[in-house]
Image: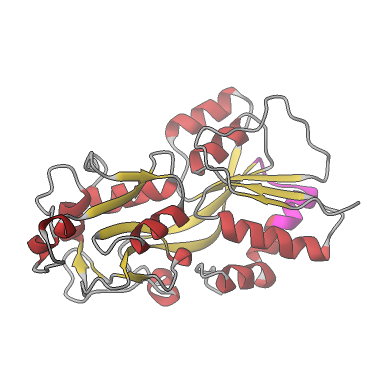
Amino acid sequence: MKNLFAYTLIASSAFLPSCGQSHAATEIENIGSDTLLEVAGALAETYGTMKPEIPISVSGGGSGVGVAALIANDCEIANCSRPLKDKEIANAKKNGVEPVQHVIGYDGIAVFVHKDNPIKSLTMDQLNAIFGEGGKVESWKDLGMDMGDDQANVIQLGSRQNNSGTYECFREKVLGKKGRFKQRCNNLNGSKDVVEFCAGSKSAIGYSGLAYKTDEVRIVPITPAGGTDAISPTVETVQKDTYPIARPLFMYTNGQPQGEIGAYIAWIKGAEGQAVLDKKGYVPLPQ
């Protein structure tokens, strides 16, 4: 059988596969998190060179989109950069779906600024004041910096949409479980969009997965609450949980995966799959 690997970024957060879609016994449809999109595509492509008879399709749209597809029985694997919510678990149960969680790696949510932005580090409290509703930091001058005229000093905020696991994790760790983002945040579709937003303006700041760094942006080290030293997201700091905005990355299946799906999940967790994560800039599982 010809390898049908398809690597597609779905921009609309409302995307779902058509209802009632049937899958061949060996087809693996993989939907969800934009944080995981690039590495999920690389994993599928690498696996396809070894087992071209197993078609694997990969698409994004956000963690919520992947979970909804799994609950609707419209995919074999849901990519998710956050744990399932209680409501999602309840909806799955109603639909006869038993989501099983698989940790396949880790990620540091990096804080990005333009490459020419001179900010050296930020504390968690400063991040809260920058992004959080009611936060008093609105200008780079509030942080002791001067970008030029008044307009250039207004901090431009790059965030994700609320169906994103990255949005959920950043909100919980930085703003608190009941915290809200400022209404003026630019809510962007994907992880890459946030980085491009920061690359396009010296006044911008945003958050996205570590793997999405480019030469046009800088990663700002973050000082944990109660800490004294600013920490950058790296393999070591994420694995040791010293970087304050780190999280596991998940794939969910309906029940314990069997057959080709089980073999694929096992391969991802093994040395070859973890090497793909490492190469793409994600943090592999500790060996």
Would you place residue 179 above or below residue 276 in this image? Answer: above
> At x 33% / y 49%, what residue is drawn?
159
The segment highlighted magenta reads 254-264
- Quarter of the image holding residue 213? bottom left
Q: Residue furthest right?
A: 1
x 44%, y 37%: residue: 85
- At 18% from the left edge and 59% from the top edge, which residue is drawn? 152
Q: Quadrant of residue 72?
A: top right
Q: Where does residue 23 sit, x and y in percent of width and height?
A: 79, 36
The colour scheme used to paint the residues is secondary structure
Residue 101, above or below 119: above
- Where residue 4 appears, x then y in whole percent? 80, 50
User: Looking at the image, how many numbered discs can be counted on the residues?
Assistant: 0
Q: Is residue 52 above or below residue 134?
A: below
Q: In the image, 66: left or right of 75?
A: left
Observer-nearest of 180 and 215: 215
Q: Position of residue 122 (x, y in %)?
A: 20, 67
Residue 94 sits in which quadrant? top right
Magenta segment includes 236: no
Residue under the point 33% across and 70% down? 219
Q: Position of residue 153 (x, y in %)?
A: 15, 59
182 and 244: which one is in front? 182
Is 21 drawn above or below residue 111 in the view shown? above
